[in-house]
Amino acid sequence: MSREVANIYDPGPISPVAQIKENLSIWTLQKWQHYRIEKCEPLPLSRPMIVEAITASGATTLAASTAAVVGTIQKFLVTFLQVQADDLVHLRWQPLDDVEGVLWEPSGTGRYTSLSVQARVSLMTALRDPYAATSTFFVMGRDRDMNLEVRNPNPVAIASARFAFWGYRYTLEPLDKLIGKSIEDGKIASTWLPAEGH
Amino acid sequence: MDNITRIGIRKAGNAGLVTTTAAAVGDTLHTLPVRLAVGQGTRTAIIRKIMAYQNTGANQALFIGTRTNVPGFVQVLPTLIAINGVETIWQELEIPAFEFTNDTTAGAAGRTGDICVIAGAIGVPVAGTLIMIEVEEIG
């Protein structure tokens, strides 16, 4: 049986990457690990899913960016996106204010990177990508959390820096190594996705 | 998505509600973002709406232009008239899509910089016109 490739970055509205009782192969802790989905539930965009980065980071304002200084909120843990071991969250996100989000996952590893730059999620992102598909990311298990850094693209200080998240949470059951080997050999179907940047 | 034309985000001019002064170089309506790294694009801005009101006792001309990177004010849009005692609104269809930029490599000298306004006459500004703009930022 051939491997299935998840259309996890499809440009349409977000949908689950696989169904309950299907297999999921996840790039985490620098290797592919194999699971079965036991449960899945949505995380709708709503007030508890919005972080206000200025207050969450303990700052009072997001400073203006000038030619000399970029107004920045240093990266901080977004606690409401933490999950338990063997839980996976599948998220898209966008700013609600005119600020740019920089994704770190785990905290020392940048996401959305090329050889020399790290892309950000801004209000401009949704102009070309209305369902925020290119913002898709995953948080797998404990202590592999996402950290958010915020940049100000404006030459004036910003009083509010909100980011909204939405998606799905999957409860996973690890598969034994023999099944994992069969998945890697292409004998058993699975959906493959990267949960971390390194 | 089949619309691949340039689009931007709409926002009020970041100077907010401005009351014109007698400053000869004009008053800032919107400060443009600076280019943060060589080789990276920065945002430009197009005025999409202008709202003005004044009650100085006479109609006042409004001159909208730039002043950064040049010695003084440079008018870039046609002169508008704010009628005494009447709120005046110009919307997107009526405003030429002049693109303001702070990237000094992108435009001719004297045509780059923040968006500014002078009321009354260039060289003889008149204070007291309330004005606010809406811009579309691209990039």
Image: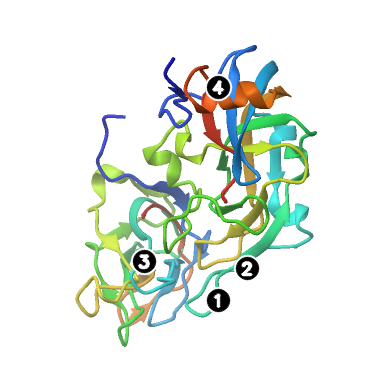
On screen, residue A90 versus residue A120, left or right, reads right
Mark 2: amino acid = Ala
Can the viewer see residue A4 in this picture? yes
Can the viewer see residue A62 in this picture? no
* Residue A112, image x, y percentages: 49, 50
The chain letter under disc 4 is: A
Give me the C-alpha separation between circle 2 and circle 4.
53 Å
Badge 4 crowding class, 10 Å Cα cut-off, few under 14, some 14 to 19, many 20 or more, is: few
- State the residue position of label 4: A182
Q: Classify A159 as above or below B73.
A: above
Give me the C-alpha separation between circle 1 and circle 2.
9 Å
Mark 3: amino acid = Gln
**Residue at 57% of width from left, 55% of height from top?**
A110
The chain letter under disc 2 is: A
Where on the picture, by quarter, is residue A74? bottom right
Mark 4: amino acid = Ser
- State the residue position of label 2: A63
